[in-house]
Image (cartoon, rainbow, N blue to C red):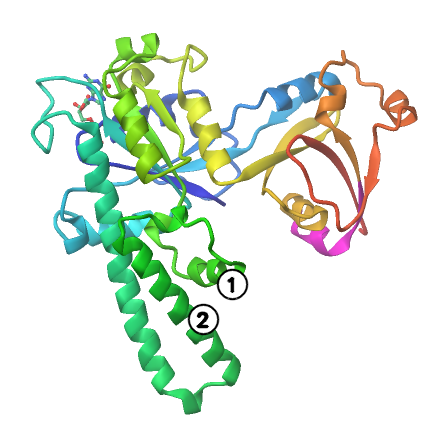
Amino acid sequence: HLASGIVGLANVGKSTFFQAITKSKMGNPANYPFATIKPEEAVVTVQSSTLDKLAALYGSQKIIPSVLNIWDIAGLIKGASENKGLGNAFLSDIRAVDGIFQVVRGFKDDDITHIEGNVDPTRDLTIVQDELLLKDMEFIENSLDRIAKNLKNKRIRPAGEVAKLEVQQKTLAVAYDHLLEGRRILDKPDWTEEEIEALNEHSLLTAKPAIFLLNVSKQDYLSGENEFLSSVQCWVDENAPGSAVMMFSADYESQIVESGENSAIPKIVNAMRDALKLISFYTCGPIEARQWTIRQGTLCPQASGVIHSDFERTFINAEVIKFRDIANMQPPLNEKSLRSLGKIARVGKTYVVEDGDLMRINAAA
Ligand code: GDP
């Protein structure tokens, strides 16, 4: 199950935001089917207008949306990579998540101390990113030492394993040089498949996608204007190109009870899903309409395995309706006429599931 973490300096509004998520009507759904939720872990349901529309078309009694796990990670301070403050514990918490919400303070309030003295979001972004880059460099140095030692022991290793270690060594050296230039691992566009596979074994902090969240006053959030927004956007274009920048107000989010009222949370959750390259497919009937989450590029049997692990092995074929073909129809949905229009396709094991596919899986019992 994919998780994302809220990261930033102390006193920027992370906990306020986290609490607002858990208290919103999207937070910690009652029928959450997974493991116990810890105080620092929230589960937030994904808002999907597609799911709502499908449920209406099928007259489904129950609607089951996807969820995203969100971790509240303790505040980072300058020097964390040298183990200042919570230092390494904090950085290993980041290692465990798949995506990062980087919260930065864009609200002025003399009563709330800024750990660096004044409100300056781009300076803060640089502090956090530098810590992540430094930590990755330290991590790579340690891994390279370990690999070099292992390679000296050649005689006890099968040839295949030696070759694999050599790929690791070569890839990590390239990654190190890239970090030395102050660039995130994620921002090197020409990693090969082999290199990506090697890097994936190390869960490097700067290889994780990030969403940049500027925490502003309620007034600024509702007006859509903040004095720091354009400089934050410039910083992100330069230092984390392609990443989403969003304004929100932790203060405002904690005041609204009904999260329909202009809450930024649904957009933030969907931006993270995009950053993680997650898409949705759906299963629908009169009993329930359900949204399922997969990675872009997932084949039909593996997608079926998300519904039930046996389905991956026993998959026969599937019927697919494209949501765009029925988006403008009125309930009740008439599948017979859809079929005669050729809008229900039968697909096999090599079909790559697309965002918005409505699926009916055929598997051997
Ligand atoms: P964290 O250390 O990043 O988790 O920060 P907190 O969420 O604990 O917030 C630190 C302080 O800033 C608290 O007193 C919050 O009430 C306050 N705070 C958080 N967000 C806002 C905001 O949007 N506006 C204002 N004025 N204060 C905020």
Asked whether residue 266 is in view, the answer is yes
Specify the farthest residue to the bottom.
Answer: 155
* Placement of 147 over or under 306, stated as above or below: below
* Placement of 156 over or under 168, stated as above or below: below
Asked whether residue 75 is in view, the answer is no
Horizontal side, residue 322 vs residue 114: left or right: right
Is 314 magenta? The answer is yes
Judged from the image, the secondary structure of the residue bearing numbered disc 1 is: helix
| Whether label 1 touches label 2, CB < 8 Å | yes
Q: Where is residue 73 in the image (x, y as percent from the top left)?
A: 28, 40
Give the quarter of the image for residue 235: top left
* Residue at screen point 68% across, 27% down: 288
Residue 46 is marked as none
- Taking depth in this image into account, of 247 and 98 the one nearest to the observer is 247
- N-term mark: 1 or 2: 2
Label 1 sits on residue:
194
Q: What residue type is labelled 1?
A: Glu
- Taking depth in this image into account, of 3 and 179 the one nearest to the observer is 179
- Which residues, given as a range, are shown in magenta? 308-318
Alpha carbon separation for disc pair 1 and 2: 8 Å
Q: In which quarter of the image is ligand 1?
A: top left
Q: Which amino acid does label 2 sit on?
A: Val
Q: Position of residue 60 (x, y in %)?
A: 70, 21
Q: Where is residue 50 in the image (x, y as percent from the top left)?
A: 63, 22
Judged from the image, the secondary structure of the residue bearing numbered disc 2 is: helix
Label 2 sits on residue:
167
Q: How crowded is mark 2: few (under 14 residues within 10 Å), some or many (20 or more)?
A: some
